[in-house]
Image (cartoon, helix red, strand yellow):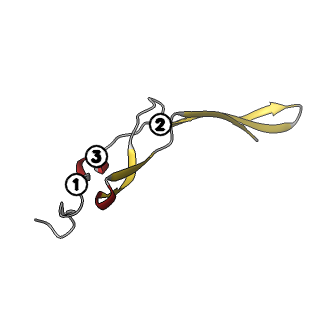
Amino acid sequence: MNNADPTTVGTPYNDEIASGPRSLVNGRISLTDIDLNGARAELALWGKNIFDKKYRLYGIDFGAIGYAGNTYGEPATYGVDSA
């Protein structure tokens, strides 16, 4: 057993709180140097977790009281930025 591996003594919900590997897709597309009557502007479209992957950030096992809790990552978000 690796020292970083959690123990199962007193923590029966280790499998429910385990966080496996994940791959998230983020992206940003921008138009720069847009001429607006002599002023320069930028317009960008962006997205985070584009495919809306549900994933655990971390969990805690309260095995002694029969409960385990998880915190999940942000869902897909999209936006527009301008400058």
N-terminal of the two: label 2 or label 1?
1
Q: Is residue 53 left or right of residue 39?
A: left
Q: Which residue does the image show at 28% across and 50% down from the upper left?
A: 18
In the image, residue 56 sits, relative to residue 30, either above or below, namely below
What residue is pinned by disc 1? Answer: 12
In the image, residue 2 sits, relative to residue 21, either above or below, namely below
Q: Mark 3 and mark 2: span between their CA atoms?
A: 22 Å
Local SS, label 1: loop
The image quarter in which residue 53 lies:
top left
Foreground tag (3 vs 2): 3
Q: Nearer the viewer, residue 22 or 16?
A: 16
Residue 55: where, in percent of width, then height?
A: 38, 41
In the image, residue 59 sits, relative to residue 79, either above or below, namely below
What residue is pinned by disc 2? Answer: 49
Q: How many C-alpha atoms fall within 10 Å of the one at disc 1: few (<14), some, or many (≥20)?
A: some
Residue 68: where, in percent of width, then height?
A: 35, 52
- One can see residue 2 in this view: yes
Q: Which residue does the image show at 23% across and 48% down from the upper left?
A: 15
Q: Nearer the viewer, residue 11 or 51?
A: 11
Residue furthest to the right in view is 37
What residue is pinned by disc 3? Answer: 16
Q: Mark 1 and mark 3: span between their CA atoms?
A: 9 Å
Residue type of the residue flagged with mark 1: Pro
Residue 35: where, in percent of width, then height?
A: 80, 32
Residue type of the residue flagged with mark 3: Glu
The circle drawn on residue 22 is: none
Local SS, label 3: helix
The image quarter in which residue 42 lies:
top right
